[in-house]
Image (spheres, rainbow, N blue to C red):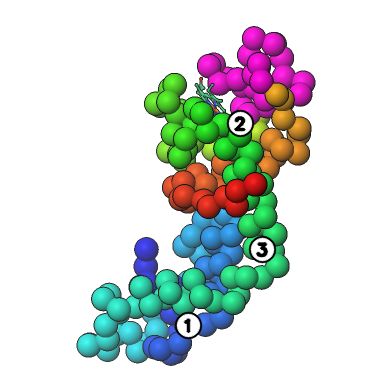
Amino acid sequence: MHLLQYVSPGSSASISPRSLANKCNAVAGGTPAGGGGGGEPPRDLKRPGFLRAAVAPPLVAALVALSPLCLAPASLGQTADIQRGAVLFRQACIACHDAGGNIIQPGATLFMKDLLRNGVGTEEEIYRVTYFGKGRMPGFGENCTPRGQCTFGPRLQEEEIKELAKFVKLQADQGWPKIEIAED
Ligand code: HEC
């Protein structure tokens, strides 16, 4: 992670709204981090004595966390999606995939490293596996076949599986941080 990408060129103290917006988008939209910097390191940062390594990253992190730009309607909507995904996940998946793990098959967790290795790195693939199942993973789709490959419990709506796929991908991208679920 390179600090300079969050510091606007030409000023050593302030953070440009654009780079904050990029940071928010990177968190909310699943675009890979690392874009949004671009260009020359600001000249001021090259001055000896500037406490860039020690002070700036936590400061930037705090500013990003507090920035009103992160509360744009898009990310609020996404928060609701994540909440629904989290509730569904707790109902249907957590027994085998607590915290993104896999108690039945340790090499097939929901962490990005495993997902990519197993060819399940996209929302579409996660949807497919969740709908139709795979190996000892039961399918949850209403039209899942053959029956032996599908859950004996309640099936999920297409819309619910989409929310789950989105949730799993987002969590995988972020290393499965804990999510508080409002109890119902
Ligand atoms: C009964 C236990 C069980 C339940 C419940 C379960 N899974 Fe799985 N899941 C597995 C197993 C076992 C695998 C590995 C399948 C394989 O690769 O052969 C797996 C694999 C996956 C994978 C691919 C992971 C990888 O790295 O290859 C995804 C994505 C997934 N499950 C999502 C879900 C979702 C979403 C739910 C809830 C709707 C769910 N699972 C419920 C057992 C379960």
The N terminus sits in image quarter: bottom left
Q: Kindly identify the residue that appears in the image at 60 percent across and 20 percent down.
A: 138
Above or below, comparing residue 151 to residue 113 in the picture = above
The residue labelled by disc 1 is 15
Tag 3's secondary structure?
helix
User: Is 45 situated left or right of 15 in this image?
Assistant: left
In the rendered structure, find residue 86 and report the number of the disc placed on it.
Answer: none
> Percent x, y for residue 44?
35, 89
Q: Kindly identify the residue that appears in the image at 61 percent across and 34 percent down.
A: 91
Q: Kindly identify the residue that appears in the image at 71 percent across and 38 percent down.
A: 160
Q: Nearer the viewer, mark 3 or mark 2?
A: 2
Among the 4 quarters of the image, the one containing residue 57: bottom left
The residue labelled by disc 2 is 92
Is 20 one of the magenta-colored residues? no
Task: Please state which amino acid type lies under the numbered disc 2.
Answer: Ala
Disc nearer the start of the sequence (3/2): 3
Between the residue at mark 2 and the residue at mark 1, the CA separation in whole angstroms equals 42 Å
Q: Which image quadrant shows ligand 1?
A: top right
Tag 1's secondary structure?
loop
Disc nearer the start of the sequence (2/1): 1
Q: Which residues are magenta?
A: 129-153
Tell whether circle 2 marks a residue whose Cβ is less than 8 angstroms from ligand 1.
yes
Q: Residues within 10 Å of mark 3 (few under 14, many from 20)?
A: few
Tag 2's secondary structure?
helix
Labels 1 & 3 near each other (Cβ < 8 A): no
Q: Residues within 10 Å of mark 1 (few under 14, many from 20)?
A: some
The residue labelled by disc 3 is 76
